[in-house]
């Protein structure tokens, strides 16, 4: 019998799409934020280390700072390098992803989920249907029928 941990990533694609649309992030941005999540503080060198694996975007670091996903924790002083950390916004978003992977439902209102707005691309409408199915499965798992 499979446990819920065996299906932990079953809806990863749906959850990832929700996060990308909701927060206007690219897949590479999301991957970078997940990589940095375990780092309390990090230098630009740690960022660049993982950035080599991602699609080429010379402005990624500056953009993530500008969009308030990263914040400078300590300025460079002499030989001490500048340190950065994830903002509260970034940490909250990542914790939300983990909760959804653990079985929290994705919101289905246009206020809480841009995918449920009226004028969205066709692909978002397909994901909308999958979110509804996913939430239904989560509810059934939580309250199984006798």
Image (tube, helix red, strand yellow):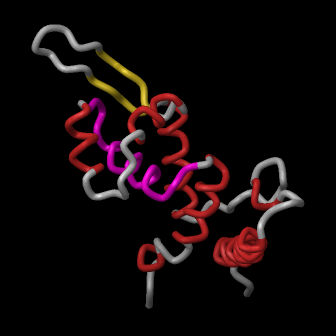
Q: Residue furthest left?
A: 79
User: Does 1 appear above or below 13?
Assistant: below
The range drawn in magenta is: 25-42
Q: Position of residue 33 (x, y in %)?
A: 41, 46
- Left or right: 144, with 42 as reference point: right
In which image quadrant can residue 132 be found?
bottom right
Q: Position of residue 100 (x, y in %)?
A: 58, 60
Along the line of sight, which residue is nearer the eye, 22 or 96? 22
User: Does 103 appear above or below 79?
Assistant: below
Q: Quadrant of the N terminus?
A: bottom left
Name the residue located 66 percent from the left edge and 72 percent from the top edge: 138
Q: Is residue 120 visible?
A: yes
Q: Is residue 143 visible?
A: no
Name the residue located 53 percent from the left edge and 55 percent from the top edge: 97
- Left or right: 52, with 27 as reference point: left
Q: Position of residue 39 (x, y in %)?
A: 28, 39
């Amino acid at each position: 019998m499979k446990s819920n941990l065996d299906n932990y990533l079953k809806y990863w694609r749906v959850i990832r799409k929700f996060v990308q649309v909701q927060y206007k992030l690219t897949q590479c941005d999301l991957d970078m934020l997940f990589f940095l999540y375990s780092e309390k503080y990090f230098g630009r060198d740690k960022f660049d280390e993982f950035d080599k694996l991602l699609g080429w975007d010379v402005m990624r670091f500056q953009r993530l700072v500008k969009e308030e996903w990263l914040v400078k924790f300590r300025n460079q002083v002499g030989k001490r390098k500048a340190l950065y950390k994830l903002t509260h916004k970034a940490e909250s978003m990542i914790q939300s992803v983990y909760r959804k992977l653990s079985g929290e439902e994705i919101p289905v209102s246009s206020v809480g989920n841009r995918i449920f707005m009226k004028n969205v691309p066709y692909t978002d409408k397909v994901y909308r249907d999958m979110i509804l199915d996913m939430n239904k499965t989560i509810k059934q798992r939580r309250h199984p029928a006798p």
